Image (spheres, rainbow, N blue to C red):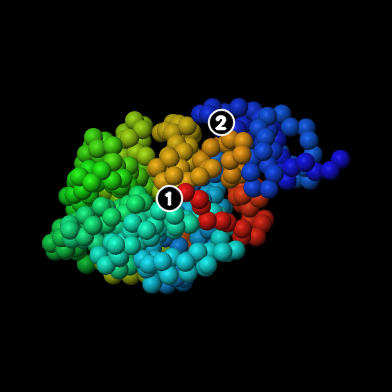
Amino acid sequence: MPDNYSLIIKNGFCYIDGKLQKTDIAILNDKIKKIGSISLNSSKVFDATNKIILPGIIDTQVHFREPGSTDAEDLESGSRAAVLGGVTSVFEMPNTNPPTSNLVEFEKKLQLAKNRMFSNYAFYFGATPENTNQLSKLKNLKGCCGVKLFAGSSTGNLLVDKEADIEKVISNSDRIVSIHSEDEEILNLRKKFIKKGNVHSHPEWRNTESAMSSTRRVVKIAERYNKKIHVLHVTTKEEVDFLAMHKKNVTFETTPQHLTLYAPDCYNKLGTYAQMNPPLRTKDHYDRLWTAIKNNIVDVLGSDHAPHTKKNKKKEYPESPSGMPGVQTIFPVMLDHVNNGRLTLEQLIKLMCENPCRIFGIKNKGFIKENFDADLTIVDMKKDQTIKDEMMASKCGWTPFNNYKVKGFPVATIVNGNIVMSEGKIISKAQGQPLDF
């Protein structure tokens, strides 16, 4: 009998309509063709006994450093790390060198990604004070997930810090504007709090008011123009309380680092390896972020994967750069939190599959449905694993979660109907595609 499907996944518990149900999935090429009891043939059958099949995990915030700092990461190595961690799609950031802030550089990045990325991908278009007139022309730009605005300076030279320019970006953009929300004026005024050689001063310098002041400003502008904005890596209890009251125009995300590590312990243990923008803060902020997760106030989880070489991270603070890798660990770390009862699997799937598709308008992903794209993440919720630096596919070769024990781990990653990762090994060539919006 000839093959009827290109892949059949049998005997697993599939996450469908908010519940786990034991059923088979048949895939033809890059689409889910049938969900149910399947007896037809395929040359490829994946036995998912005792495993859970989830919609493909989406990481909405990664920095893969290409073009520019490819000693720390590139599109190939970053996407390899993604699929090893169960991530099937990524949104990649524009603060490269040169920045992705015009259509020529955007097209170049799409070409760089072609046949080199293991995961599916979309790229942010970087806002500058000079390109605000271009932002109304991005509606149908293939592979574009939105506009990225740095209201406070971080890695790279994309900065839009004057209120009049921020207003132009938000009011002109026909795509959602995602914002690194720190107030540049406050950051500059507070540089006196930087203590040379003492990374504990990082959250003192980039304090809660620098974040809150900026977030208050961008929300006010979004509401004035009735535009949608998305606030990235929210870290403070003040912002959580404020954003909870302003959900009409605003969505926001946080990171697994801010839900797992907190000051001063993280700086005692990791030193400058714990340095990121906005910073890891004290436990009262961590606790409030968890309350917001439990109450479904946080919309999205993104890793803010921002790798730097060990050589650079070892520099004396504040010469050490901010950022840490996370695309390979975001999902295992969050699965461990599910197993520990910090959030439900249903909440995690909303944060990493359904909400990214709803907020950004990704087509045909985020759910296990017939005729949807065959992007799937298969997990063993009972698998114990110790995360190690040596496991990391990122060129930077380290993780803040080195020696961190987790329970629950991705055992296969299926991208566009192809099994790309199985049992911790890449078994397919890079065939990632740009996302459709």
Quadrant in the rendering for residue 381:
top right
In the image, taking residue 306 as reference, residue 318 lies left or right, namely: left
Tag on residue 110? none
- Mark 1 closeness class: few <14, some 14–19, many ≥20 residues within 10 Å: many
Tag on residue 16? 2
Q: Is residue 258 visible?
A: no
Q: Is residue 113 above or below residue 88?
A: below
Measured in 3D between alpha carbons, the distance from the residue under mark 1 to the one under mark 2, in whole angstroms, is: 22 Å
Q: Residue at x 61, y 39 (%)?
A: 371
Q: Residue at x 22, y 43 (%)?
A: 223
Along the line of sight, which residue is nearer the eye, 20 or 201?
A: 20
In the image, taking residue 385 as reference, residue 267 lies left or right, namely: left
Where disc 1 sits, the SS reads: strand
> Disc 1 designates what residue?
60
Q: Label 1 amino acid?
A: Thr
Q: Is residue 393 above or below residue 211?
A: below
- Mark 2 closeness class: few <14, some 14–19, many ≥20 residues within 10 Å: some
Quadrant in the rendering for residue 7:
top right
Q: Locate residue 87, reporting x and y percent.
A: 52, 49
Q: Residue furthest right?
A: 1
Q: Label 2 amino acid?
A: Ile
Q: Is residue 3 visible?
A: yes
Residues tagged 1 and 2 counted as in contact (Cβ below 8 A): no
Image quadrant occupied by the N terminus: top right
Q: Residue at x 66, y 50 (%)?
A: 418
Where disc 2 sits, the SS reads: strand
Q: Locate residue 309, reporting x and y percent.
A: 42, 68
